[in-house]
Amino acid sequence: MHASQPRCHRVIAIDGPAASGKSSVARELSRRLGFVYVNSGAIYRAITWHILQKKIHPEESDRIAGALRVAGITCRLQDNESRILIGGVDPGEHLRDDPVNKSVAGVSQFPVVRQLVAKKLHEDAQSHDLIVEGRDIGSVVFPDTPYKFYIDASPEVRLQRRAAQGERDEIAIRDRADSLRPVSPLVIAKDAHVIDTSHLTIQQVIDQIIGLLKKMGLPI
Ligand code: DC
């Protein structure tokens, strides 16, 4: 991984399981603080979409590695959000398609995929202050950032949130795969602040995080 690479800018890590509310929180926080928002799950989803487009089976790690070597993955800034282009295409509208939901946890278990995503995130951190959401951001990708949050919610609330978004997403299966994979599993970084959002509004979560960031000395 690239955890030891020098980082010029500040990074706020927001990790947590599927449908815990971390995207809404991270996006709103980026508006409030002016940091660039990066959804690392979207990069794993874009890679998965590309692999499926190429008719590569999500378990064929060698073919996945080969496809990624030639894919041309770049990020561009849009409205203070980092968006991924793969092979020159922004797969935005396809990122939450059923086949992507089903395969993304499998594709993201492979070290070659994880190293590529970590490299992209480190490149972003060379030029911008970032709010990065994901599964291993505080534990593996940016272990030296002091600003780490783990956003959680009960399984019932998370299921309700996904259903309200009108999405079919087997979050229990993804949670299991994300937590049990050998490389960079979903864990709570030991120095992360854990926030259970089950009974909180986004605004309440943001207020808690901003309060904690101020206490940690971030000038905001
Ligand atoms: O945040 P999300 O549900 O959109 O993430 C989709 C998948 O991407 C998730 O099931 C596992 C993978 N992922 C990961 O392995 N590591 C990250 N930092 C972010 C996402």
Image: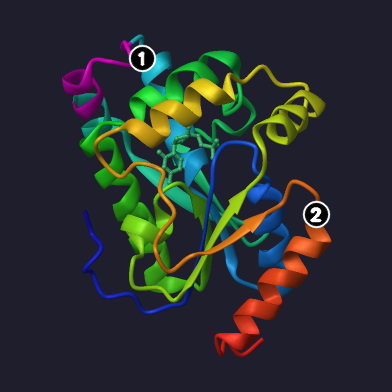
Q: Is residue 63 visible?
A: yes
Q: Quadrant of residue 65?
A: top left
Three-letter code for the amino acid on which mark 2 is drawn: Leu
Instruction: From this view, report whether residue 3 is shown above or below residue 74.
Output: below
Task: Give the residue drawn at x 52%, y 14%.
Answer: 99
N-terminal of the pair, mark 1 or mark 2, is 1
Task: Give the residue drawn at x 57%, y 25%.
Answer: 171
The label on residue 54 is: 1
Report the mark closest to the observer, 1 or 2. Answer: 2
Q: Is residue 136 magenta?
A: no
User: Would you say the beta carbon of the disc 2 residue lies within 8 angstroms of ligand 1?
Assistant: no
Q: Is residue 87 visible?
A: no
Q: Quadrant of residue 126?
A: bottom left
Q: 199 or 112, which lies in front?
A: 199
Q: Residue furthest left?
A: 62
Q: x, y (%) of residue 47?
A: 40, 31
The label on residue 200 is: 2
* Quadrant in which the C terminus is drawn: bottom right
Read off the magenta span: 56-65
* Quadrant in which the N terminus is drawn: bottom left
Lateral position of residue 175 relative to residue 121, left or right: right
* Mark 1 crowdedness (10 Å alpha carbons): few <14, some 14-19, many ≥20: few
Q: Is residue 58 magenta?
A: yes
Q: Quadrant of residue 111?
A: top left
Classify mark 2: helix, strand or loop. Answer: loop
Disc 1 and disc 2: Cα gap in Å?
Answer: 41 Å
